[in-house]
Structures are given as structure tokens and as C-alpha cells.
Image (cartoon, rainbow, N blue to C red):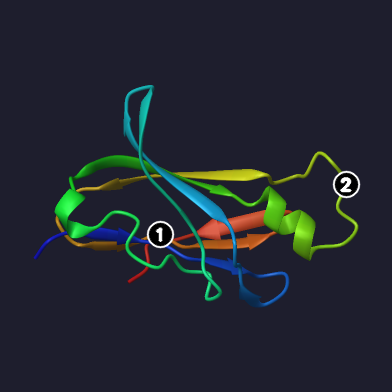
């Protein structure tokens, strides 16, 4: 089985998928970051394809950065600048060739993540 990485974003404040959020994926080695992919969430809050497909998969440490500021400004009222959350980084490791799913559950003042399926 080949490994690959998927993600999605759910707006927990509004109870719906978060469309239009830019996501960047970096490979991390010590303090060095190498951008390897960038995409935007679709109307279902998902990416149209795995952000790290099987043919590019390698085990290691990665970081997803969810650029959620523009989405929050467009969908929430009464938020003041600077936003509490503008870009959300999630650093994680992938140690075996499997399907990794790293979602973001987002609200204007908090977020959570987990290893999904």
C-alpha cells in the first residue's frame, strides 16, 4: 500500500465546510521548511486531490499551514483586526506508508485537529 495525505476544513462556528481556504504543505527537517504543495479547499471543504499523492509520498515530518484569515473575514461578522487566527500551522509526522488524513476544525477563536481516516 502506498501512502498519501488528505485534508479538509470544517467551520465549526457555522456548522459547514469551509470553502476557499488556501493550504500549503511543507516538508520539515529541523528548522528548514520546503514547500511541496499548495491548494485551495472546494465547496465541500476538501481538496480536489490528495495534497500529497502516493507518487510523491515519503515518510517524515510535515507541516500544513491553513491560511484561514480571508475566509474568516468573509464569513464571520464582528471580527477585529488583527484576527485571533489568521494562519494555522499543524506539524505532524508520517511514519509509515498509509493514508493520513489531517483535518482542521475551525472557528474564529479556536481550532482542533486529529488523525482521521
Quarter-of-image position of residue 18? bottom right
Residue, far left: 1
Residue depicted at x 33% and y 23%: 30
Residue 50 lies, with reference to residue 64, above or below; the image says: below
Q: Nearer the viewer, residue 8 or 20?
A: 20
In contact (CB < 8 Å): disc 1 and disc 2: no
Which of 40/33 is in front?
A: 40
Estimate the spatial distance between the alpha carbons at disc 1 and disc 2, rounded to whole Å.
28 Å
Badge 2 element: loop
Q: Residue at x 34, y 41 (%)?
A: 62
The residue under the point 72% across, 69% down is: 13
Q: Is residue 33 visible?
A: yes
| Position in image of residue 88 (x %, y %) | 57, 46
**In-image side of 98 versus 78 (left or right):** left
Viewer-proximal residue among 90 and 33: 33
Q: Quadrant of residue 98?
A: bottom left
| Front position among marks 1 and 2 | 2
Q: Quadrant of the C terminus?
A: bottom left
In the image, residue 50 sits, relative to residue 56, either above or below, namely: below
Mark count: 2
Q: Residues within 10 Å of mark 2 (few under 14, many from 20)?
A: few
Q: Which disc, if any, is residue 80?
A: 2
Residue at x 75%, y 44% (from the top left corner): 84
Category of crowding for the residue at label 1, using alpha-carbon neighbours closer than 10 angstroms: few (below 14), some (14–19), many (at least 20): some
Q: Which mark is residue 102?
A: 1
Q: Earlier in the sequence, mark 1 or mark 2?
A: 2
Q: Position of residue 20 (x, y in %)?
A: 59, 61
- Residue 72 image point, x, y percent: 73, 57
Q: Position of residue 8 (x, y in %)?
A: 47, 65
Task: Please identify the quadrant where the N terminus is shown.
Answer: bottom left
Amino acid at each position: 500500500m502506498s501512502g498519501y495525505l488528505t485534508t479538509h476544513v470544517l467551520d465549526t462556528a457555522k456548522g459547514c465546510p469551509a470553502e476557499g481556504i488556501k493550504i500549503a504543505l511543507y516538508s520539515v527537517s529541523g528548522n528548514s521548511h520546503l514547500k511541496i504543495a499548495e491548494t485551495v479547499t472546494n465547496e465541500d471543504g476538501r481538496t480536489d486531490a490528495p495534497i500529497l499523492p502516493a507518487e510523491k509520498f515519503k515518510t517524515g515530518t510535515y507541516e500544513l499551514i491553513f491560511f484561514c484569515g480571508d475566509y474568516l473575514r468573509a464569513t464571520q461578522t464582528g471580527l477585529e483586526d488583527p484576527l485571533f487566527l489568521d494562519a494555522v500551522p499543524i506539524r505532524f509526522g508520517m511514519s509509515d506508508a498509509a493514508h493520513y488524513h489531517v483535518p482542521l476544525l475551525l472557528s474564529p477563536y479556536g481550532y482542533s485537529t486529529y488523525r482521521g481516516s
